[in-house]
Amino acid sequence: MKKKRRIWIALCVALAIGIGVICMLVFQRKTDECEIANESSEPIMPGDSIELVEPMEPMEEWLKSFPVLPVPSVYQGNLGSGFYAVFVESSDVSELKGHYLSLSDEVSDTIAFTLSAEGSRVRFISRDVDVSHRVKKIREDDSRIDGRIRNGLMSYTPFSFARCEMPAFESFDTTRYLLPQFEVRHLDSIHFADVEGYWTELDELTNSAGDMIFQLGKARDERDLDLYMDVYYPKGDTLAKRPLVMLIHGGAFYYGTRKDITTKAFCEHLASLGYVTASIDYRIGFQPTKDGIERAGYCAIQDAHSAMRYLVANRDKFGIDTSMLIVGGCSAGGITALGLTFMTNETRPESTCVGNRKGDLGGIETSGNDIDVSFSIKCVADMWGAMPSLEMLEGRNVPIVAFHGNMDNIVPYDFDYPFAMAGFFKKTLFDKMYGSSCIVERAKELGVKAELYTFDGYKHSPQLTKKALNENYYFIQDTMSRFFSEVVRPVKPQIKKANQKYYLDKSAKHVSWQVEGGFVCECDEKGIKVVWIGNAPQRRLKVTGIQQYGTGFVQELKVE
């Protein structure tokens, strides 16, 4: 009787266990369907999270063959609680080979693996591991694989991997403002001011020496004059706002034209580099007295100021970034460019003020037009120009690049009278002026970026030989372009690191990262997070982008 009772109890226990196992298996299946399935089939980008959601129609079956994946390709996801990157190197329906990388640490080795479909089981071989499991799949295509690995009767490990696509690395041109890259277009004869004066152009190429001397007779009565400029710009440039270079022709405040060979060549070259450039008229001609010549120089500065005001006010029309305004000129144009940059109403010549028998010429900003805008010159090119006083340099941190022949007998290289060949009359007609060597020396003493290039043995206008451009012109052109670019181009951003994330210490647009010997697991506008491959031959980070004024940059970092 006791024996029968034991048998009966054992049967009841076995039946209860069986029913319990069946219930648990059903419960486990329902739980798996809710936790494993993922309805998204889109590739993910580095840093995207993979959320497991309940599918509308679970499709779970034992994995017997592999989807053929793109080769090479990279997948990112989780296996249980671990996160990995999988680099697929070969793929067919029966075998998958590649390397995997743990994303849990900052540095991790890649490990080779092979997955083989063997009947109803999947065999995993990697380094010291060789195991077989049954795998249930819920979703499979070339963009993602979701499923679970059976570890035992009621034990499963979920996995979810989605294809990872790094944004394409984009290189940006780093030679803007250094090398020609645009065709040039120009707008001719743009009116910017109405003034009273003697004349606005006298071309020495089309006028004889007699005609030019006879012109002095016209410097008796002033008349109404229109001032014009020619604007040059890069054709096809996608940059909306560009730095401006305004150039001023020479001619002793007596002759010259905005279309002279040197000024036009500079304008066209600089526009081909990516600048907006302008060549301007200004009043020329004077009565042959010290005051008359001094007042002519001041009128030129007033006219240059009105031209710059016009360009600043019309910045949208011409595509000008008014935070980077550059001015330059040759001879009288160099004197005018320096005056526009450094002269103030407090330092203007006395001959232009109240009390002069010819009358007050007004403030620097009061002539030509009634445009009321302010501006700041960021760089000046002095080509065989001069200044009446070096005190004007004080408190003005404006970079200067200067070119001058040390035998110049028209505008002094050092501190001397202009027109040295005039003998006694030079002291009657002029005050001494500070030439380029003095200007640059003083600027350096004040801590200003300044460079002087001396043409040894050359007199005035070293860029011309028989009124044609010579090799000195091209030296000036390239040197000036390089100097301007150093002012225009911002300091390159540096790559910094914080909490395993790399970022730039300065703002930039269109930033593009490239990693060698590592895997990017996060990427956003603030930077990237990298897991470095410990067994890679080298580890390097490269970043490119665009800074202010459309200047491209490249920065690299070698990771030890």
Image (tube, rainbow, N blue to C red):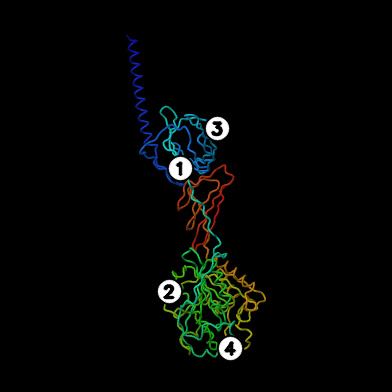
Which amino acid, by three-letter code, is at mark 3? Asp
Which amino acid, by three-letter code, is at mark 2? Val
Q: Are marks 3 and 1 in contact (CB under 8 Å)?
A: no
The Cα–Cα distance between marks 3 and 4, rounded to whole angstroms, is 99 Å
User: Nearer the N terminus, badge 3 or badge 4?
Assistant: 3
Q: Pointer 3: what residue?
A: 128
Q: Nearer the viewer, residue 446 or 22?
A: 22
Q: Which mark is on residue 373?
A: 2
- In x, y percent, where is residue 556? 55, 53
The Cα–Cα distance between marks 1 and 4, rounded to whole angstroms, is 84 Å
Circle 4 SS class: helix
Circle 2 SS class: loop
Which amino acid, by three-letter code, is at mark 1? Ser
Q: Given this view, does label 3 or label 1 mark the residue nearer the observer?
A: 1
Q: Given this view, does label 2 or label 4 mark the residue nearer the observer?
A: 4
Indicate left or right for 388 with 462 as reference: left
The Cα–Cα distance between marks 1 and 2, rounded to whole angstroms, is 58 Å
Q: Are marks 1 and 4 in contact (CB under 8 Å)?
A: no
Which amino acid, by three-letter code, is at mark 4? Ile
Q: Pointer 4: what residue?
A: 213
Q: Nearer the viewer, residue 431 or 512?
A: 512
Q: Nearer the viewer, residue 172 or 544?
A: 172
The Cα–Cα distance between marks 2 and 3, rounded to whole angstroms, is 76 Å
Residue in the image at 48% along x and 34% along y:
65
Q: Are marks 2 and 4 in contact (CB under 8 Å)?
A: no
Number of other residues with Cα within 10 Å of mark 2, as a class: few under 14, some 14 to 19, many 20 or more: few
User: Nearer the N terminus, badge 2 or badge 3?
Assistant: 3
Circle 1 SS class: loop
Circle 3 SS class: loop
Q: Are marks 1 and 2 in contact (CB under 8 Å)?
A: no
Q: Which mark is on residue 143?
A: 1
